[in-house]
């Protein structure tokens, strides 16, 4: 498929599992892609794998000037900007301290919001004028299932992802007449390297709740981004696409009821 032929895309967090898979997918569908990440060498490696249709750019999600320079780079390199996939996220070593409101360090809360939310806001701020001049565009923000339900930890992460959903709907509302669509993707459990590094090896608690017979892969998110970026989603804006194997589709007690019924047989 060449649904994105002649389109230009920025993928932030492009050196990570989801970002890399998305950059590859968009390029396969015809787009030219700026692979943006704070890890310059890793971003360059992804761009090199893709070939001439990609360029790497280091950017710091906590630095407004760096985000503006990223958008300017895409314009100078490829001449336009049609797709923005805001996908960078905070993955610092202190994430273990993202626990409860009563315990989380305030600096960690602020850092999480700067990277997970403020960077998305700024990328949209700088990208939208170029999209308007180009006749429109598609913005896809990475949220999370954590935006919609509470958990026993990760209050900053979940709160920042919830704010992304609200911002997505505001942008969709305010820029629809500019032919700019803005949507969010809410991934469930995705087997990325970051997840592997978390030390979680027992997937059974997750598999009890996921309706799909398998766990998600980065390519599942990449496919969703490609769809939302394409004209196949021309009438889709202001929505959240849950890519979670059905995790969010059922009552929280379904797995327990299934176990009870199996034991009664």
Image (cartoon, rainbow, N blue to C red):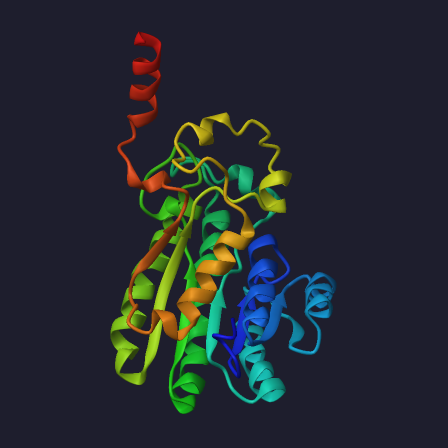
Considering depth in this image, is 167 or 8 the residue closer to the camera? 8
User: Residue extending furthest front?
Assistant: 1
Q: Residue at x 58, y 79 (%)?
A: 69
**Point 49% across, 52% down: residue:** 220
**Does 43 sit above or below residue 16?**
below
Residue under the image location 62 percent in, 39 percent down:
196
* Image quadrant occupied by the C terminus: top left
Q: Tell me where residue 79 sits by quadrant.
A: bottom right
Residue 217 drawn at (x, y percent): 54, 47
- Work out whether residue 33 can be spotted: yes
Q: Position of residue 81 (x, y in %)?
A: 49, 82
Point out residue 212 in the picture as x, y percentages from the top left corner: 42, 38
Q: Nearer the viewer, residue 34 or 27?
A: 27
Q: Is residue 49 left or right of residue 188?
A: right
Task: Locate residue 18: give its quadrant.
Answer: bottom right
Q: Where's residue 113, x and y in %?
A: 44, 56
Is 187 located above or below residue 127 in the figure?
above
Q: Is residue 90 visible?
A: no
The number of numbered discs placed on residues in the rendered structure image is 0
Residue 18 lies left or right of residue 123; in this view the side is: right
């Amino acid at each position: 498929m060449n649904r994105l032929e002649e389109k230009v895309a920025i993928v932030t967090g492009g050196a990570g599992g989801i970002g890399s898979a998305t950059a590859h997918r968009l390029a396969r569908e015809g787009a030219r892609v700026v692979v943006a990440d704070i890890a310059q060498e890793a971003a360059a490696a992804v761009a090199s794998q893709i070939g001439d249709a990609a360029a790497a750019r280091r950017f710091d999600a906590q630095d407004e000037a760096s985000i503006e320079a990223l958008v300017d780079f895409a314009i100078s390199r490829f001449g336009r900007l049609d797709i923005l996939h805001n996908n960078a996220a905070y993955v610092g070593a202190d994430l273990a301290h993202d626990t409860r409101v009563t315990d989380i360090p305030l600096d960690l809360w602020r850092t999480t919001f700067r990277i997970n939310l403020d960077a998305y806001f700024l990328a949209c701020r700088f990208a939208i004028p170029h999209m308007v001049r180009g006749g429109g565009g598609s913005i896809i923000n990475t949220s999370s299932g954590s935006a919609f339900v509470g958990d026993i930890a990760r209050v900053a992460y979940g709160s920042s992802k919830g704010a992304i959903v609200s911002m997505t709907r505001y942008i969709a509302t305010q820029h629809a007449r500019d032919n700019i669509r803005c949507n969010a993707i809410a991934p469930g459990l995705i087997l990325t390297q970051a997840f592997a590094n978390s030390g979680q090896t027992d997937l059974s608690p997750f598999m009890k709740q996921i309706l799909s017979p398998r766990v998600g892969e980065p390519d599942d998110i990449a496919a969703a981004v490609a769809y939302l970026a394409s004209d196949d989603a021309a009438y889709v804006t202001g929505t959240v696409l849950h890519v979670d194997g059905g995790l969010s589709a059922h009552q929280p007690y379904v797995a327990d009821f299934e176990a009870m019924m199996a034991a009664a047989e």
